[in-house]
Amino acid sequence: MSKTTLTRRGLIKSGAIGSAGLALPTIFTAQSAHAFTNEPTGSTVTLGFNVPQTGPYADEGADELRAFELAVEHLNGGGDSGMLSTFSSKVLQGNGILGKKVSYVTGDTQTKSDAARASAKSMIEKDGAVMISGGSSSGVAVAVQALCQEAGVIFMAGLTHSNDTTGKDKRANGFRHFFNSYMSGAALAPVLANAYGTDRKAYHLTADYNWGYTTEEAVRSSTEAMGWETVAAVKTPLTQTDFSSYIAPVLQSGADTLVLNHYGGNMVNSLTNAVQFGLRDKQVNGKDFQIVVPLYSRLMAKGAGANVKGIYGSTNWHWSLSDAGSKAFVKSFGTKYGFPPSQAAHTCYVQTLLYADAVQRAGSFAPCAVAEALEDFEFDGLGNGKTLYRGTDHQCFKDVIVVKGAENPTSSFDLLEVVEVTPVDQITYEPDHPQFAGGALGTCNNGV
Amino acid sequence: MLKLTKSDFNLMLLVAALTLLAPFILNPFPTDSAMAQFNAGYPDLMQRFVIFGILAVGFNILFGLTGYLSFGHAAFLGVGSYAAVWMFKLLSMNVLPAIVLSVAISGLFALVIGYISLRRSGIYFSILTLAFAQMMFALAYSVLTPITGGETGLQLALDDPRIFGASQTPGGNIPVPSLFGLEMRESFDLVLGAWVFTFNFGYYFCALVLLASFYLAIRIFRSPFGLMLRAVKSNQQRMNYTGLNTRPYTLAAFVISGMYAGLAGGLMASMDPLAGAERMQWTASGEIVLMTILGGVGTLIGPVLGAGFIKYFENIFSKINDNVLHEWFAFLPDGIENFMVFIIHPFIGKGWHLTLGLLFMLVVIYLPGGLVEGGQKLAAWFQKRGQKTETSKSKIEPAE
């Protein structure tokens, strides 16, 4: 035990040191010294890429991260400049954004709202990110979007398909390039009518969470509008891995079409079960039994293997598209990583470019200026044809790709083939469409 | 002082110093240096440290004292958050009513779940609590979507019918949680040369709550009630045979620890007004158990350290990517640089679970008493070195 003795001399000495220490903080700044949150003052600007690196969507997260790295490389003038050369807006010169070199930080969303927000917060509070992008599920997208609104930074959503992201949970600081459940339904319905006729009886198996609900609603209303009848819609727990008990009642119900509103591992398992049960070899009501998967991804097709043959679905983008933008992107992604990009990678790459372009056009990183530049912005050459970033709900409107499982795939990247590119007019909806009702954009937030 | 023994008072002082000086302690590296990656002194993470600290302290009252291992404690955290967010939506953006309600509601849930689960002990008790927590998670995730927001979580909206206070700020945004007008996100930056220290109001609010709950935990540990709980842990059968009904004691401990979890949930929602169902998942419950074991079961400060340890890895290591590594090793020749990055790559970014797992194994194998035991061993080692020069009789009491 040490003993402290208090002497007059000692007290004066330590007092002097203490007051010197107190005098030291010369710049005592509140955050309000900046015009907006994380205003980049140096020669670099930091973007935050928040993707699932662990958990069920880790594969997609890894692909998103690759796309982000590629985008940053292209923005900084490296590589072969990818879609920058096909992009209709030509303000980006390959010298970063507004002359500032683009740097980035990464984080792990774990596909959990809490972890995603913690990670995004650390990017904003610690690393000074002015924009957050990425994510591979709607729950995370909605959570991080709300956070960005509150903090005053721009959120460029990654893969999120639920109507809610730009529907009831839309925010003024958040933007989505990816398509949504409604668009899937609207694009699929005519193709299904062509292929399977207009008097089908559909049975829905729906993943029991938000995205499942909106997708079921979208597909139901679109198919019912063209004459299909919905026999039943059964919700399945998200954690379900064996769907046999859900598949068995399908046949007794008199339905002749099964719609699987499942994503990721759910879809892989339910589709495999359905095919193993021999559903596709059955004849019901004098018609061949059919299966439909509203949202496809290449990684899912890979998981389900040969079971996806001939099964229809929709996707935001596919690497086999032959427009100049897609080709340029596939080429630079392939050169760098050795395989074609997924739709998640595509949307993340495009979002980064769109953000950079908007900043450049606005001449400022301030979220409100960027939002204004993005709103009602029309562009082309980024892989989906002519696209509009609608100002009223911050949703991109572009052609939707209807795909089918390839009958004779030549490689593991070739599992899907494009059946039809549904033109944008067919999938456009009014901002106050019932499936998107409720919620408001609010006003853009520049932060403190 | 404060009706504490000297060593407890010193421990209390230590915790107070650690929490109040956290902005300095957690930001040891200059902002522009390469080591700044390891700085943890930003508001969100500091808030998380103390909030999970509260959670772990509460959990330790049950697990450390009675030995009942609840594997569903995250459920109370989730219930607390939902209660708080609903308070924000319906009543006011003041955090006090929200926190009070979240503690009360989670206490109620704990009472019901504890009443049923405590009919069994040991592994059966753990399984029962786990089952309840998973049930609540499943309900929150899908069935109760109108109340809990389901997968997307419960959030504030622009049209919330807030009784006291406006639904929107004049600027057209959602108001933020505050304490009588003091916003939780309000921060000051203190610039000292190359260092930047951030003082966040929300953090200090949480820190004070942590100190209060820590004090309460010490008092419970030292009380006759605490002694009774320890007796339950050492031999419950004997207590029953002596004619003593232990159920009320264990139930009380369960409810108290559930309320601590609810308090943590309420605070979490106050710092960041969102409540998600993942907070209640069994992995979250497992994390609480890990925190307590990592820090030191049955010790007072251990759980707080364990909570900090895990949250640090989750938030700091997961953010290191190959780019950062290349920056660190840029001074090495290219070949060696790439080799170093290759070696370290599996342990950072998405590999943070792996690093944490390895450290957890090391702690459990070499320091079964958790980080606290490590601290004691270190202290003992210094003590020994000191004794060589002067023979001192004083012996450092093991910090509990």
Image: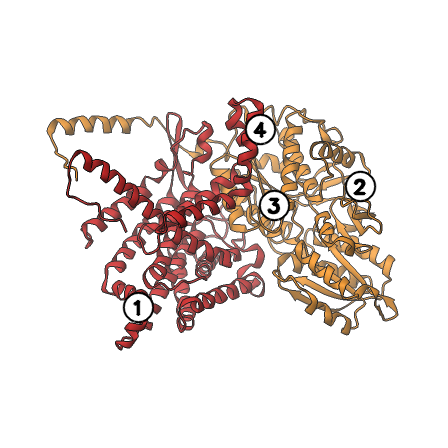
Chain colours: A orange, B red
Q: Circle 4 marks a residue in which chain?
A: B
Q: Which mark is residue B235?
A: 1
Q: Position of residue B141 (x, y in %)?
A: 56, 61
Q: Position of residue A379 (x, y in %)?
A: 74, 36
Q: Which mark is residue A135?
A: 3
Whether residues under marks 4 and 3 lie with C-beta atoms below 8 angstroms apart, the answer is no
Describe residue B363's horizontal placement relative to residue A430 as left or right: left
Determine whether the residue tagged by mark 4 lies in a helix, strand or loop: helix
Whether residues under marks 3 and 1 lie with C-beta atoms below 8 angstroms apart, the answer is no
Q: Position of residue A178 (x, y in %)?
A: 69, 45
Q: Which residue is mark 4?
A: B338
Residue at 19%, 29% (x, y): give it: A15
Distance Cα–Cα, label 3 vs label 1 = 50 Å
The image shows residue A248, relative to residue B399, as above or below, that is below
Amino acid residing under circle 3: Gly
Q: Residues within 10 Å of mark 1 (few under 14, many from 20)?
A: few
In this rendering, which labeled residue sits more in front, label 3 or label 1?
1
The image shows residue B177, relative to residue B246, as above or below, that is above
Distance Cα–Cα, label 1 vs label 4 = 57 Å
Check if mark 4 and mark 3 are on a common chain: no
Distance Cα–Cα, label 2 vs label 1 = 69 Å
Determine whether the residue tagged by mark 1 lies in a helix, strand or loop: helix
Front residue of this view, candidates A182 and B39 = B39
Q: Position of residue B172 (x, y in %)?
A: 53, 46
